[in-house]
Amino acid sequence: MRKSFQYYLGILVFSIIISIPLLLPYLHPGYFPTHDGEWVVVRLSDMFREIRDLQIPPRYSGNLNFGYGYPLFNFAYPLPYYVGVFIHFLGFGFVDTVKLLFALTIPVSAFFMFLAAKNIWKNNYAGIISSVLYLYFSYRLVDLFVRGSIGESFGFAIFPIIFLCLSKLINNPKRVIFMIIGAFSFAAIILSHNIMAVLFSLSLSVFFIGNYIIHGKQILKPFSFIVFFGFILSAFFWVPALLEKNNILLSIVPIADRSLNFVSIKQFLFAPWGYGVPTDPVNGFSYQLGWPFLVIILTSIALFIYKFYKKQKKTAELRLAITILTGIFVLILFMFPFSKPVWKLPLLSEINYPWTMLSQLGFLSSLLAGYLVNFKYTKVIAFAAVVFALILYIPLAKPTNYVDKGDGYYFTNDATTTSSNELMPLWVKALPFQRPDQKVEFISGEGSINNLVFNSKKISFTATNGEDSAIRINTLYYPGWQISDNNQKITQTHDSKFGVMDIKVSKGTHNIIADFSETPLRLVSNSISIIGVIFLGLFAFKNRRSYVNC
């Protein structure tokens, strides 16, 4: 046990050491601007409000959209913000929490890539090669220092955990703990980034095919268990997000024109480093896979041709490596314009940026590099590729500049945090540009509003009027809002330009309460996830003796 602890501690120390160049910018005071990074801080502060208001799970932002609110976390991936709120409750500010979230994904991804590659290729050097390359490839740095995508950064940390669990289960199907960890990890991918979940399913399919060729039907159980329960555990998020999509602008207008986001051969092989949006011809960020990874791919091709020519025995590792290389070639094709028909397939049609496939190419190429250490000459090339990657990419591990706006700037930000207001309900005809003068107001008739209290999930007030009147609650309607007048449910309309809730009241005094609660669909989705957690808990307890020597 002590020897095992020392081994894992050594891997953790190694992971931290190789992460240092990527971690240093996060130790600088303040923050640095990226495409999405500052919006992450705003979203985190809003998630904090929703949880503070006991809106569980958080779905509706009551503060953003200039105080009119909108259903942000009903559609936006929530897991990074759940973790962020927990860290914030420990005493960290919002900016420092976001920096810590990004920073933690770096050594965590290196640690688990080491374990995954070592377990798959049965070689500690494979762990070293794969983990270093996994940190130092161009798109990973783009995510950290240019795009600032917290969801994708979480994805990078989780990908190797799932491969590690599956490889452990292939070696010993009775290791129940890895089935459970794998299921929660697959759920975490779905909750961390919608697009990464779809793209990772392609890498997972490649890994499945390779292992099916080697092991046959015995791998069906662990793969099926992890995927099935991953969907069950995350159902509270993805079911409403998918089935309620027809309520929002994204259902009719894509975020971006996919045809502008395919990659050219030149961009794939060599693209100068930039900090702008990808369509910027001068300063757009890089689409390149990176020469160290192209070296790994070309070396693998040469090695496989040599083994075929020599008619060497096809080992299990060789079969898997060939499958991974084949998968890499297929995924590369997805990035170019001739693959347009593929992007019309279900789920892939939801993705507007083909260049995000670089996330999977970097992951699979890094894993493939670990295979090369099993042979004398290719081991040298693999280590050379690592050195090459460090030389090329460490100088790029830096932001454009630093800013220090303070937590207050983000906590009071009124924007929607979306690029094209794509999560806005379809019944919203105009977007506000300032907060309403009053949260609740009479739009016909006269009266007074008293005892007004409101947060992200509840609005209550007393209305006194001398004639039949109409009252406007300046909160954007979304299914789940219910209004009662003196404990009697009443109907509302939301056909005003901002899509807010209007009610009619008769002469008299009215105690009005508006509550945001779960719809039947969301209640069923929540129940599915809760049942999944309970089942896995009982499953873990029942099989607790199998954890020994895992």
Image: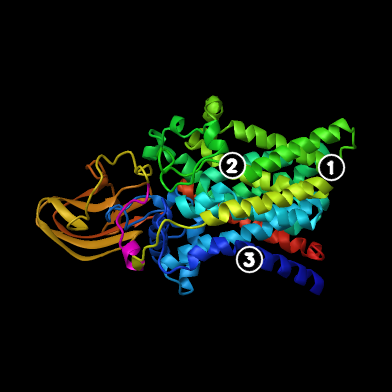
Q: In this view, does 481 lie to the left or right of 315?
A: left
Q: Give the range drawn in magenta.
A: 407-418
**Count of numbered circles on the image:** 3
Identify which residue, 322 or 209, lies in the foreground: 322
Q: Which residue is drawn at 71% across and 65% down?
A: 11
Q: In this view, does 179 lie to the left or right of 484?
A: right
Badge number at residue 316: 1
Indicate the amino acid at tag 2: Leu
The crowding category of the residue bearing disc 2, from other C-alpha atoms within 10 Å (few below 14, some 14 to 19, many at least 20), is many
- The reply to whether discs 2 and 3 touch (Cβ–Cβ < 8 Å) is no
Indicate the amino acid at tag 1: Ala
Badge 3 is on which residue? 16
Identify which residue, 224 or 348, lies in the foreground: 348
Q: How far apart are marks 2 and 3 (CA)?
A: 24 Å
Q: Which residue is drawn at 89% across and 33% down?
A: 310
Image location (x, y in percent) of residue 44: 42, 60
Q: Residue at x 73, y 49 (%)?
A: 382
Q: Is residue 329 magenta?
A: no
The crowding category of the residue bearing disc 3, from other C-alpha atoms within 10 Å (few below 14, some 14 to 19, many at least 20), is some
Residue 193 in sight in this render: yes
**Which sits earlier in the primary sequence, circle 1 or circle 3?**
3
Identify which residue, 82 or 394, lies in the foreground: 394
Specify the quadrant that holds the C terminus: bottom right
Q: How far apart are marks 2 and 1 (CA)?
A: 27 Å
Badge 2 is on which residue? 289
Above or below: residue 309 compared with residue 393? above
Q: Residue at x 41, y 44 (%)?
A: 283
Viewer-side label of 2, 1? 2
